[in-house]
Image (cartoon, helix red, strand yellow):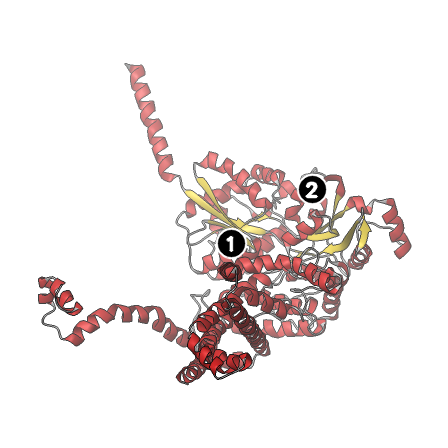
């Protein structure tokens, strides 16, 4: 009789636990861009589903439409996303317009410390106003713009000899922007294995953010800055400094003399296609793609090499990457916070890196074996040490579109000079900041 | 069945309904029937228009619902009309509009005239010619980007084959000079069949006896063409121009897919520019003023044109 009672009590208890779990189980929608790391996150999140009982749904939007689609969603107070891995530049708008939940109290309650994450990523992906201890996202995906090249071509003795003859230097991974240009020009229209090849695939896309992300890689290296004094919006002499002008002129020369024909509106996909199809010797793209590139059966493995964006006057790389935020319009904020708590754990972060995501957690990045864990890991660490990002202001979209226009007009459409392009850019930005009441 | 249609409708009307509306005047009943349509028109067309006009005098931004909205008078209008970049997009639109209409009218009318001559396979050719306009503009934009590809594109290859130039030596959508023509070519390819169909309808509406009378009067074919064919097809042609003109003034999808407004901004038509201002930069007040300016422009030009069309019809 006693055994029967115990069994009955156990059954009731089990049923009530199951019932309570079922009542709390939510279906969470996580929104992000459609790219390689998103697939890794789907794989990673299965563990969260198993542990929490929640189910995960994913809304991945291709990069060219990602900002448009997601910012429209946020601006309309949409409930599509419970969690959003939004671009770093959205943090200002997300915070000031009330799209993102402020996470400070949650972090304090759950013992999540921002000191556990790389400082550059916390600054770029989580804080608003910049550098303040107000957190609106957890650093989720570290990223920067880097380079990859055809190592097998670089190692061919006949190509090395031809390069030496043409330049008097050894062919190697470029150490400066000017060396990069020299190598790209060397490969331009050169016949290798019976086919005509080109120098480099770079970003020239007009519609979203492409040419800005590409050109700033060169401009930062020359010394381009957004403001003379951070937070003062004093752009004259910074945005259009002689160094910035030189950097922009360099990017135009790279575009005009060392890219494949018709390369006028190219971004991530086009860069990957150009490289994988054997068109170019070098290509720029985000580190996020590097695991997939290395694994490529045709152009990966021994045939590919990676290098960080070369410096010129200074070492600098364009920042990519994103933080993960809880959307303020979500009805499932508790479950969404649960996901963030789970994601912040060191062992989950380690698995995230092993699956192809770029963890920003110190336990992963400071691991002695990290640099050798992937052929591009050391470059990633180096790049993240000198990243620079675009404006993260609430009016970022307007600021970005102005730069897209001015750069594309100058670099691709041959309108005016670099000096004029940057002078006009200051006019555009000044108008925006005046509208914003910041000037 | 005896009586007129009205008698039969009156007989078929249920007595209780007839009784219920008995107390209303004809005018009231007419209003009752028209009211839903008017309400819908007000809600869908008139209210948004008035609201847009209202917003055009403000600094409202749809992505900043919490920000205070200020009335800034005609500042938005002043900014737009003095902005050299906006005038460049207007020029790009005018170039696109003029040349697409020109080519579509010339080629469309020529095709219609040829198709109208009875020959074997006439129907098959008509079907083949109208195929492009059945496609989605987004699809057309996309596949023409491949056709224009300098290294593998069929268009470049064809030009190279005919002229002997290197196919990768020119870029239709990447060159500042060629890109405006690239979008003209694609729109002409897609929409010439539309103009052709309307012209064909006009040509087929000309009675044969007019030509027979002209033949008796010993009028030459050339004279018949200019004094019979052209004047009688002209109202149809003008209608086609009106439709295509309005459509092309607000052209968006095809050009976005094809060039994205580039290189630089040489193919950034007003509708693309307006979309960027409204839904990418979120300058709602500014974009409202921009939309009103475009609306007034199209409405004004279309009104003048319709008057001219009516005059041609009356002749």
How many numbered badges does the structure rendering display? 2
Q: Looking at this view, is B34 or A89 the one in front?
A: B34
Label 1 sits on a secondary structure element that is: loop
In this rendering, the answer to whether B217 lies above or below A105 is below
Whole-number angstrom distance, CA of label 2 to CA of label 1: 33 Å
Q: Position of residue A232 (x, y in %)?
A: 61, 69
Q: Looking at this view, is B174 or A397 the one in front?
A: B174
Residue underneath mark 2: A294
Task: Say whether disc 2 or disc 1 marks the residue closer to the N-terminus.
Answer: 1
Q: Quadrant of the N terminus of chain A?
A: top left
Q: Is residue A202 left or right of residue A173?
A: left
Q: Chain of mark 1?
A: A
State the residue lying farthest toward the top. Answer: A1
Q: Is residue A90 left or right of residue B304?
A: right
Label 2 sits on a secondary structure element that is: helix
| Mark 1 surroundings within 10 Å by alpha-carbon count, few (fewer than 14), some (14 through 19), many (20 or more) | many
Which residue sits at x=46%, y=43%?
Answer: A57
The quadrant in which residue A198 appears is bottom right
| Mark 2 surroundings within 10 Å by alpha-carbon count, few (fewer than 14), some (14 through 19), many (20 or more) | many
Q: Quadrant of the C terminus of chain A?
A: bottom right
Q: Is residue A261 left or right of residue A328?
A: right
Q: Position of residue B136 (x, y in %)?
A: 50, 59
Q: Looking at this view, is A254 or A388 the one in front?
A: A254
Residue underneath mark 1: A136
Q: Position of residue A106 (x, y in %)?
A: 47, 48
The quadrant in which residue B300 appears is bottom left
């Amino acid at each position: 009789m006693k055994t029967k009672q115990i069994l009955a009590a156990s059954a009731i208890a089990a049923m009530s636990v199951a019932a309570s779990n079922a009542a709390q189980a939510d279906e969470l929608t996580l929104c992000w861009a459609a790219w390689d790391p998103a697939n890794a996150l789907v794989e990673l999140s299965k563990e969260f589903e198993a542990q929490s009982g929640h189910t995960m749904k994913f809304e991945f939007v291709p990069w060219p439409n990602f900002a448009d689609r997601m910012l429209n969603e946020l601006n309309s107070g949409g409930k599509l996303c419970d969690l959003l891995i939004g671009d770093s530049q959205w943090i200002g708008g997300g915070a000031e317009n009330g799209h993102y939940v402020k996470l400070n109290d949650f972090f304090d309650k759950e013992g999540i410390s921002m000191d556990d994450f790389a400082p550059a990523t916390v600054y770029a992906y989580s804080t608003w106003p910049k550098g303040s201890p107000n957190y609106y996202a957890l650093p989720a995906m570290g990223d920067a713009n880097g380079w990859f090249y055809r190592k097998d071509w670089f190692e061919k003795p006949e190509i090395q000899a031809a390069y030496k003859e043409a330049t008097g230097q050894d062919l190697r991974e470029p150490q400066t922007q000017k060396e990069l240009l020299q190598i790209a020009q060397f490969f331009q229209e050169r016949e290798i294995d019976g086919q005509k090849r080109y120098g480099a695939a770079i970003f020239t896309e007009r519609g979203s953010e492409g040419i800005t992300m590409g050109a700033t890689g060169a401009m930062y290296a020359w010394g381009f800055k957004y403001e003379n004094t951070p937070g003062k919006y004093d752009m004259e002499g910074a945005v259009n400094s002689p160094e910035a002008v030189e950097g922009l002129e360099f990017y135009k020369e790279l575009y005009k003399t060392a890219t494949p024909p018709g390369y006028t509106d190219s971004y991530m996909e086009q860069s990957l296609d150009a490289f994988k199809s054997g068109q170019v010797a070098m290509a720029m793209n985000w580190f996020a793609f590097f695991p997939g590139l290395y694994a490529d059966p045709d152009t990966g493995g021994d045939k590919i090499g990676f290098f960080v964006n070369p410096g010129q006057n200074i070492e600098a790389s364009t920042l990519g990457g994103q933080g993960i935020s809880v959307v303020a319009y979500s009805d499932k904020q508790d479950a969404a916070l649960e996901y963030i708590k789970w994601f912040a754990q060191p062992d989950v972060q380690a698995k995230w890196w092993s699956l192809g995501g770029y963890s920003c957690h110190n336990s992963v990045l400071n691991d002695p074996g990290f640099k050798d864990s992937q052929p591009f890991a050391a470059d990633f660490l180096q790049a993240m040490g000198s990243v620079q990002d675009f404006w993260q202001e609430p009016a970022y979209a307007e600021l970005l579109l102005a730069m897209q226009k001015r750069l594309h007009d100058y670099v691709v459409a041959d309108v005016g000079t670099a000096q004029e392009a940057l002078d006009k850019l200051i006019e555009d930005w000044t108008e925006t900041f005046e509208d914003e009441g910041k000037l | 069945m005896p009586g007129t249609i009205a008698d039969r409708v009156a007989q078929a009307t249920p007595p209780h309904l007839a009784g219920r509306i008995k107390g209303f005047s004809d005018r009231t009943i007419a209003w009752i029937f028209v009211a839903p349509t008017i309400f819908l028109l007000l809600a869908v067309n008139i209210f948004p228009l008035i609201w847009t006009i209202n917003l055009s005098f403000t600094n409202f931004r749809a992505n900043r619902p919490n920000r205070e909205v200020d009335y800034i008078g005609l500042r938005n209008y002043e900014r737009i009309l003095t902005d050299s970049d906006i005038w460049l997009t207007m020029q790009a639109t005018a170039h696109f509009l003029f040349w697409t209409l020109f080519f579509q009218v010339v080629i469309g009318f020529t095709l219609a005239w040829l198709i109208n001559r009875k020959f074997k396979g006439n129907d098959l050719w008509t079907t083949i010619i109208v195929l492009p306009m059945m496609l989605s503009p987004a699809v057309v934009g996309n596949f023409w980007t491949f056709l224009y590809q300098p290294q593998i594109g069929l268009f470049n290859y064809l030009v190279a084959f005919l002229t002997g130039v290197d196919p990768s030596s020119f870029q239709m959508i990447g060159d500042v000079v060629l890109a405006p023509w690239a979008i003209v070519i694609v729109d002409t390819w897609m929409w010439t069949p539309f103009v052709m169909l309307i012209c064909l309808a006009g040509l087929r509406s000309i009675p044969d006896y007019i030509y027979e009378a002209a033949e008796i009067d010993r009028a030459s074919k050339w004279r018949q063409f200019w004094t019979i064919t052209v004047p009688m097809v002209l109202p149809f042609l003008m209608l086609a121009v009106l439709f295509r003109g309005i459509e092309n003034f607000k052209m968006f999808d095809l050009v976005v897919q094809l060039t994205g407004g580039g290189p630089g901004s040489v193919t950034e038509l007003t509708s693309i520019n307006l979309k960027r201002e409204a839904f990418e930069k979120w300058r709602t007040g500014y974009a409202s003023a921009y939309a009103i300016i475009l609306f007034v422009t199209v409405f004004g030009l279309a009104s003048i044109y319709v008057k001219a069309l009516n005059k041609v019809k009356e002749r």
